[in-house]
Image: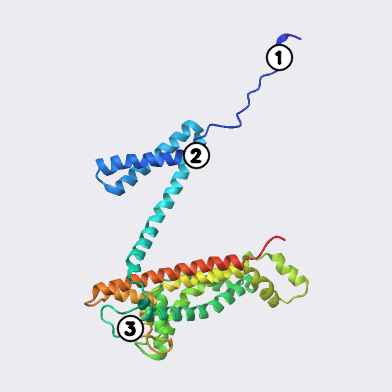
Amino acid sequence: MTDLDSKPAETHLAPLSHATLPGWAPWATVVVGLVVGAIVGGVMLGGGVVATVVVAWLVVVLALPLWSRAVEGGRKGTDRLVTVLVWSTFGLAMIPLVSLTWQVVSKGVGILSPQFFQNSMAGVLGSGGGIYHALMGTLIITALATLISVPIGVLTAVYLVEYGKNNTFSRIITFLVDVMTGIPSIVAGLFAYALFVAFFGPGVKMGFAGSIALSVLMIPVVVRSTEEMLKLVPADLREASYALGVPKWRTITKVVMPTAVAGIVTGVTLAVARVAGETAPLLLTAGLTNYVNFNPFDGRMTTLPVFIYYAIKEPGIYAEEMTAYAWGAALVLVVIVMALNVVARVIGGVFAPKTGR
């Protein structure tokens, strides 16, 4: 055996670690980008904030991936580029949301007071009025629409999932629900108006007609959300109940529905939030009044969206006061919708099936 044969073979192992950028690298790139953007976009181009942000974004998009590629390699550089693009799209999507929220809060918070919530516009010219009549109208009409939509929507979803089993009738219902999901809100208002005109004559306006119009928009949302939640219930739970001799209807009420109740309630709450801000169908069906009306079956009933619409469209000679009322009502409506979404999240967490021992 020669000395050459006795030497062990050399092996080349890939390193287990690679050079990485420091944790402050992305923030440093953003700072440099803002400085360059302020110099190039704000000073040289004279474009102000918009030009500064655009130039800073271009610097970050180019500098951080190239720096990462030089230090960390091509794959990490590509990952950095995609990360920057994802965060950029998120920031772009947040611009209108933040801008809208800021506008509503800044222009609406000044008029909020106990008087604003306790008074209506009955006999009010200029200052001294409030949204009490519109707030009560919104709550009453939306509550009635919910009472109409939830039983119909939930029972329809139960039939589609538990009894339909893709038969011809269930496929027809599914098709109609899909069509109803995409109809414009004004069509729902025209349907409700035509329905009530057939019974009460032309020019009829009442809160219950508005509830019917909103229920047309709510039912497909409730059906779809409930259907998806029922489909998520494991089939093993149903089979275990059937194996114990439990009837199907009792299995649905005692096993399936309690398991899916969190998702169902969340879907219903989101459906309520979706219709709470509708204007077009209520213009046709509920109308406008400056007085408080607690009877949805008799006379006009104003809601917050309709109040906002007329306050801007027909302010009269008190345009400044009516505009302030509109911004205040818009802020209250946004808070109501946000509260409904928070309630949906909380209910979903509280009533979700508990796992583990």
Q: How many residues crowd mark 2 within 10 Å: few (<14), some (14–19), many (20+)?
A: few
Q: Which residue is mark 3?
A: 290
Asked if residue 187 lies left or right of residue 126, the reply is right
Percent of width and height locating residue 185? 41, 73
**Residue beneath the point at 47% across and 43% down:** 82
Residue 155 figure quarter: bottom right
Q: Which residue is mark 2?
A: 23
Q: Are marks 3 and 2 in contact (CB under 8 Å)?
A: no
Residue 45 figure quarter: top left
**Residue beneath the point at 53% across and 72% down:** 268
Query: Going by the picture, which residue comes out furthest to the right?
Result: 244
Asked if residue 306 lies left or right of residue 175, the reply is left
Asked if residue 97 lies left or right of residue 147, the reply is left
Percent of width and height locating residue 81? 45, 41
Q: Is residue 348 above or below residue 13?
A: below
Tell me the tag on residue 7: 1
The foreground one among 292 and 273 is: 292
Identify the mark nearer the N-term, 2 or 1.
Answer: 1
Identify the mark nearer the N-term, 3 or 2.
Answer: 2
Question: How are the colours assigned in the image?
Answer: rainbow
